[in-house]
């Protein structure tokens, strides 16, 4: 399926599919979630952009939310990314498309993210695409149940992307 994946800008009509993905069974340990109102607000913001990944049939199988597209220092942030079915190569293929979109723009120098420190699977995908670890934000995420989790920061620069397997 990963070879037949298409990246497109998301529309308001895609929010139900996006919310269904982020609420997949067991995803709460690895992916943040937003209410419909939060998603609508972010989608309307000039500081955010939503993408979906679609299969050859047109079904939405992945989504990503980016922030800080116009950051004065050229740092674009990956707020959230998720796929319908993990462990099938879809996440890496989708993220490769998203990273390519980011660095095809004139301004971005660095693309960064944070993920739950316990999400080793995601960190392996990020590393395969050239992201490196920048540090840990200790107890930075407050879960809905009141638990706190560490976040691992990871990033890739335009030069690293160009020199790696990601650039065309």
Image: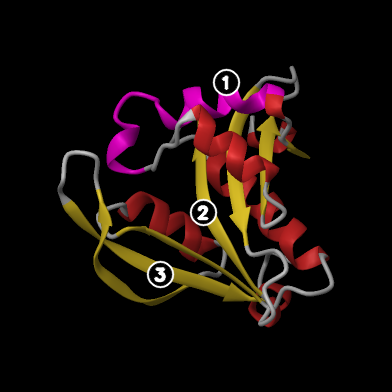
Q: Which residue is mark 2?
A: 79
User: To which quarter of the image does residue 28 belong?
Assistant: top left
Structural distance between the alpha carbons of marks 3 and 1: 29 Å
In the image: residue 107, left or right of residue 30: right
- Dominant secondary structure of the residues highlighted in magenta in the image: helix
Residue 26 in percent (x, y) is at 29, 30
Mark 1 to mark 2 CA distance (whole Å): 18 Å
Q: Which residue is mark 1?
A: 16
Looking at the picture, does residue 112 appear above or below residue 89?
Answer: below
Q: Residue at image x 36%, y 50%?
A: 121
What is the tally of numbered marks visible in this picture? 3
Earlier sequence position, callout 3 versus callout 1: 1
Question: Around disc 2, counting alpha carbons within 10 Å, would you say few (fewer than 14), some (14 to 19), or many (20 or more)?
Answer: some
Q: Residue sitting at 51 percent across and 54 percent down? A: 79
Q: Name the residue tied to disc 3.
A: 153
Above or below, comparing residue 23 to residue 87 in the picture: above
For the N terminus, the image quarter is: top right
Disc nearest the viewer among 3 and 1: 1
Specify the segment rendered in magenta: 13-30
- Label 3 with label 2: CB-CB less than 8 Å: no
Residue 168 visible in rendering: no
Sooner in the amino-acid sequence: mark 3 or mark 2: 2
On the rendered structure, is 1 left or right of 118?
A: right
């Amino acid at each position: 399926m990963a070879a037949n994946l298409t990246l497109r800008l998301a529309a308001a009509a895609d929010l139900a599919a996006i919310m269904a993905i982020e609420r997949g069974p067991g995803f709460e340990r690895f992916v943040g979630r937003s209410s419909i109102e939060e998603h609508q607000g972010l989608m309307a913001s000039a500081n955010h952009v939503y993408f979906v990944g679609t299969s050859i049939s047109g079904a939405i199988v992945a989504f990503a939310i980016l922030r800080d597209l116009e950051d004065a220092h050229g740092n674009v942030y990956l707020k959230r990314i998720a796929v319908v079915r993990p462990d099938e190569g879809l996440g890496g293929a989708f993220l490769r498309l998203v990273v390519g979109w980011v660095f095809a723009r004139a301004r971005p120098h660095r693309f960064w993210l944070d993920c739950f420190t316990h999400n080793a699977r995601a960190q392996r995908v990020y590393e395969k695409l050239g992201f490196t670890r920048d540090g840990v934000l200790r107890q930075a995420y407050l879960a809905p149940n009141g638990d706190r989790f560490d976040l691992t920061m990871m990033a890739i620069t335009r030069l690293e992307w160009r020199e790696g397997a990601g650039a065309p």
